[in-house]
């Protein structure tokens, strides 16, 4: 069966690299599902959750802090501003970042740039928290085990 070579990289490191069956990515216009033989595509990604599916294996969840995705018939390359696999996320740190960002956003004297930075930090931390929580709920589930791809679980 055809598969996709998937690579997720940041400026700092390669976060994920493997042959996969399906990728669900947080596009700026909504969730994008990528299967083998997808038409060529270049698109921006927003803050959110990247889901990677491989037959016979548990789904992989990665928190994405925006970036770009390039798709060809046999590959998906994601250049992310930030990316962390579920198992690498420090939930307390993300929770602290979320609180800090909310406090900053509540302050009245923020200029537009500070507000935009705080909003980005908030969305980044929310994506990390969502993905970190997958660790607890995704045990023993993979492709073909009865849930629709990307469905809330
Ligand atoms: P924080 O406010 O918690 O530092 P941030 O988004 O500002 O969050 P950066 O300082 O830009 O974080 O990130 C430095 C490195 O730490 C990056 O490699 C990033 O992927 C990683 N990182 C950030 N937050 C977390 C987290 N909660 N768990 C694991 N890695 C994280």
Image: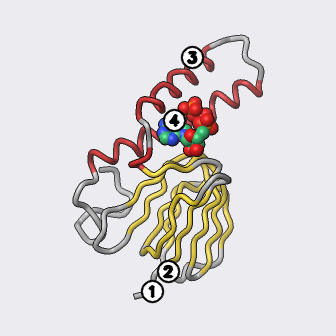
Instruction: Report how far apart the C-alphas of labels 3 and 2 lie in the structure.
Output: 44 Å
Question: Where is residue 36 shown, x and y percent of the image?
Answer: 49, 80
Among all residues in the image, which is located at the extreme front?
13
Q: Are marks 1 and 2 in contact (CB under 8 Å)?
A: yes
Q: Does dot 4 land on a helix, a strand or a loop? A: helix
Secondary element at tag 2: loop
Q: Nearer the viewer, residue 143 or 148?
A: 143
N-terminal of the two: label 3 or label 1?
1
Residue highlighted by disc 4? 125
Q: Is residue 137 left or right of residue 127?
A: left
Q: How many marks?
A: 4
**Above/below status of 22 relative to 88:** below
Residue sitting at 65 percent across and 68 percent down? 70
Compare residues 4 and 85 and report the one nearer the observer: 85
Judge: label 4 CB < 8 Å from ligand 1: yes
Q: Which label's residue is closer to the chain start, 3 or 4?
A: 3
Quadrant in which the N terminus is drawn: bottom left
In terms of secondary structure, where does tag 1 sit? loop
Tell which tag, 4 or 2, sits nearer the viewer.
4
Marks 1 and 4 in Cβ contact (< 8 Å): no
Labels 3 and 2 touching (C-beta < 8 A): no
Q: How is the image coloured?
A: secondary structure
Instruction: Answer yes or no: is residue 126 visible.
Output: no
Residue under pointer 1: 2
Q: Secondary structure at mark 3?
A: helix
Q: Reading the chain from its start, which is encountered first: label 1 or label 4?
A: 1
Above or below, 55 relative to 153: below
Residue 103: mark in rendering:
3
């Amino acid at each position: 069966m055809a598969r996709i070579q998937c690579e997720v990289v940041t400026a700092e490191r390669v976060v994920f690299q493997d042959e996969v069956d399906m990728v669900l990515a947080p596009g700026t216009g909504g969730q994008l599902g990528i299967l083998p033989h997808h038409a060529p595509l270049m698109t921006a990604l927003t803050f959110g959750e990247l889901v990677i599916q491989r037959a016979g294996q548990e789904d992989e969840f990665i928190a994405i802090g925006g970036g770009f995705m390039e798709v060809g018939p046999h590959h998906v390359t994601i250049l992310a501003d930030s990316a962390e696999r579920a198992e690498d996320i420090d939930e307390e740190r993300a929770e602290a970042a979320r609180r800090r960002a909310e406090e900053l956003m509540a302050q009245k004297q923020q200029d537009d740039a500070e507000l935009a930075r705080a909003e980005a930090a908030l969305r980044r931390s929310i994506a990390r928290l969502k993905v970190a929580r997958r660790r607890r709920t995704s045990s023993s589930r993979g492709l073909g085990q009865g849930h629709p791809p990307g469905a809330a679980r």
